């Protein structure tokens, strides 16, 4: 590798030479969704990559201006069906701030339990598809997908839906914990903790995976901060930043957990951050089940939000997700701005997929856990 | 929050006001962790450079456009945050400026905040805001055959999904 260019992503569209070839990867589902990456290759090396996104752009922000606050919830969580609670929660927080509604403690605990279950599900999805399939490891694909379904069943028991829950509305969650839920969830966590050990043995300690992902796609700490990446991608580069700690919401203030970080910044450490986070999520859910107070779960919130703007954020599975909601004294938002993890991590794609072998591209792409629909909105 | 000490939100506001007494028109500490700063659009690069180099706000989380046809303006909001300074990494500083609706032009901050690259492209596409000096200002999300004004402007209406 030569010296670092002064500006990391300025090399997009680097001039073609006599030995280069332009290849379009996607948009017909290169693995995780619908985005196209235009790569320019020189032999087996990728010279530059230009992400061409927007194939699943739905105009969520525009539609949100036409629907009232509550009926916005289902379509605003659709962009990421594997992480619906966080997309939902991030949107509800600024509305509650505008309306001055405080969620009762029990409601905050239930939201936290649902969110951490969702984080495990999303990381299992990432483990199965983005990490397992992309590195050619079929066993972990089957295992992680199978175990994810057990969490999905419990999520269905809690919210009534498998993936798109629309569970949180301004004021609190829609339902209390159903009868027998706590018991089933703690049994599932016992089972899942044993499975995590097996995951480690078959996948994370697998010499093939280590050979393919260690030292591949290194994002150094300095670059990670400069590019403004978020979530596991940022924490794998050694930056301890997690919204659950820097600006606690829900019940995270009362619960004890660690923020796993790694120093290497390569694809392997991005895999490992998610793996360690699942262990933390198990511990968070256990504590929350133990500490959950009795009382009301939600307060009644008005349908109208006053004039003004509020910004709320949560730590989704793909990193900080920030919503800016602008009210205008009506039942519809004047403007909703979504700043999510996938769109902010997009910038790492052309930066990392450069001067690497073509065969390393799926590993790097998978390690970013980029979700095209979330980025396109 | 404790009443005795000056909060870090106020410290940030004071530092910005002291450095740019003319360009910064209005500042507001909305609540803990949130600061809003209204400024003159000509000074965006200087403010960004000062925030990046001296205050430690090293990235933008997003750039939002807000269209107000009645006041004939487009507001541009930069959501700046910090990774390198743990003591201020819970703050979001919202830098807010107004552009005329007929010619929304502002200097690009990509040379200072690399993270703004795709956010500026998105705002250019959705609101028609021209970011001068952006290295690669192209469409990003809409189809290549999208004709007409930028889709997030309020003149573009979608009666089939509802009324506003």
Image (cartoon, rainbow, N blue to C red):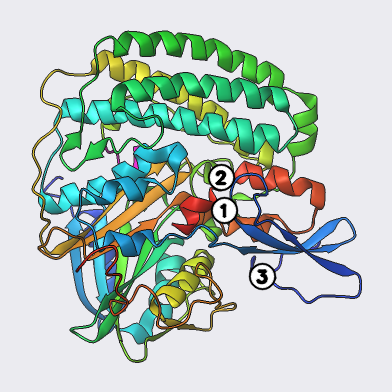
The quarter of the image holding the C terminus of chain A is bottom left
Q: Chain of mark 2?
A: A
Are circles 2 and 1 on residues that touch, CB within 8 Å?
A: yes
Pointer 2 local density, CA inside 10 Å: few below 14, some 14–19, many at least 20: many
Q: Nearer the viewer, mark 2 or mark 1?
A: 2
Percent of width and height locating residue A17 = 86, 75
Q: Earlier in the sequence, mark 3 or mark 2?
A: 3
Determine which of the numbered discs, if any, sits on residue A6 in the image. Answer: 3
Helix, strand or loop under label 2: helix
Q: Quadrant of residue B77?
A: bottom left
Percent of width and height locating residue A267 = 67, 41
Q: Which residues are magenta?
A: A244-249
Helix, strand or loop under label 1: helix
Determine which of the numbered discs, if any, sits on residue A233 in the image. Answer: 2
Check the image and report above or below for A21 versus A190: below
Percent of width and height locating residue A243 = 37, 42
Residue at the far bottom: name it: B102
The residue indicated by pointer 1 is A224
Q: Earlier in the sequence, mark 2 or mark 1?
A: 1
């Amino acid at each position: 590798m030569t010296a670092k260019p002064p500006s990391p992503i300025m090399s997009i569209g680097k001039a073609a030479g006599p030995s280069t070839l332009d290849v379009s990867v996607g948009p017909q589902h290169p693995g995780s969704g619908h985005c196209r990456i235009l790569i320019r290759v020189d032999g087996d090396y990728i010279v530059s990559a230009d992400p061409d996104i927007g194939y699943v752009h739905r105009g969520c922000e525009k539609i949100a201006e036409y629907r009232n606050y509550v009926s916005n919830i289902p379509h605003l969580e659709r962009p990421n069906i594997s992480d619906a609670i966080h997309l939902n929660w991030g949107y509800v927080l600024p509305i509650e701030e505008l309306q001055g509604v405080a969620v009762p403690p029990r409601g905050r605990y239930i939201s936290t339990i649902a969110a951490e279950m969702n984080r495990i599900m999303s990381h299992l999805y990432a483990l199965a598809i983005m990490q397992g399939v992309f590195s050619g490891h079929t066993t972990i694909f089957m295992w992680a997908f199978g175990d994810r379904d057990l969490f999905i069943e419990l999520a269905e028991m809690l919210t009534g839906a498998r993936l798109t829950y629309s569970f949180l509305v301004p004021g609190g969650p829609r339902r209390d914990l159903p009868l027998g839920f706590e018991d089933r969830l703690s049994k599932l966590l016992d089972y899942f903790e044993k499975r995590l050990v097996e995951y480690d043995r078959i996948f994370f300690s697998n010499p093939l995976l280590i050979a393919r992902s260690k030292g591949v796609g290194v994002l150094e700490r300095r670059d990670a901060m400069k590019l403004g990446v978020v979530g596991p991608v940022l924490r794998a580069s050694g930056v301890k930043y997690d919204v659950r700690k820097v600006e606690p919401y829900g019940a995270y203030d009362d619960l004890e957990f660690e923020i796993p970080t790694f120093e290497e910044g390569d694809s392997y450490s991005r895999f490992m951050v998610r793996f360690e986070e699942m262990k933390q999520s198990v511990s968070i859910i256990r504590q929350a089940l133990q500490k959950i107070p009795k009382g009301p779960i939600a307060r009644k919130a008005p349908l109208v939000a006053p004039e003004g703007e509020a910004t709320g954020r949560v730590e989704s599975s793909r990193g900080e997700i920030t919503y800016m909601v602008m009210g205008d004294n009506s039942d519809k938002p004047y403007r909703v701005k979504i700043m999510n993890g996938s769109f902010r991590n997009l910038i790492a794609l052309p930066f990392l997929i450069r001067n690497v072998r073509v065969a390393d591209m799926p590993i790097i792409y998978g390690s970013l856990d980029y979700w095209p629909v979330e980025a396109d909105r | 929050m404790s009443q005795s000490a000056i909060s870090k939100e106020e410290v940030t506001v004071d530092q910005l006001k002291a450095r740019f007494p003319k360009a910064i028109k209005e500042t507001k500490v909305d609540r803990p962790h949130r600061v809003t700063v209204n400024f003159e659009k000509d000074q965006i690069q200087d403010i960004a450079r000062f925030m990046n180099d001296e205050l430690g706000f090293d990235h933008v989380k997003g750039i939002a456009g807000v269209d107000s046809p009645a006041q004939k303006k487009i507001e541009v909001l930069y959501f700046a945050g910090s990774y390198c300074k743990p003591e201020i990494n819970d703050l979001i500083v919202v830098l807010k400026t107004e552009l005329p609706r007929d010619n929304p032009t502002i200097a690009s901050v990509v040379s200072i905040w690399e993270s703004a690259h795709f956010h500026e492209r998105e705002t250019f596409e959705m609101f028609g805001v021209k970011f001068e000096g952006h290295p690669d200002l192209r469409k990003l999300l809409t189809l290549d055959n999208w004709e007409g004004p930028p889709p997030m402007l309020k003149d573009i209406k979608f009666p089939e999904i509802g009324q506003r």
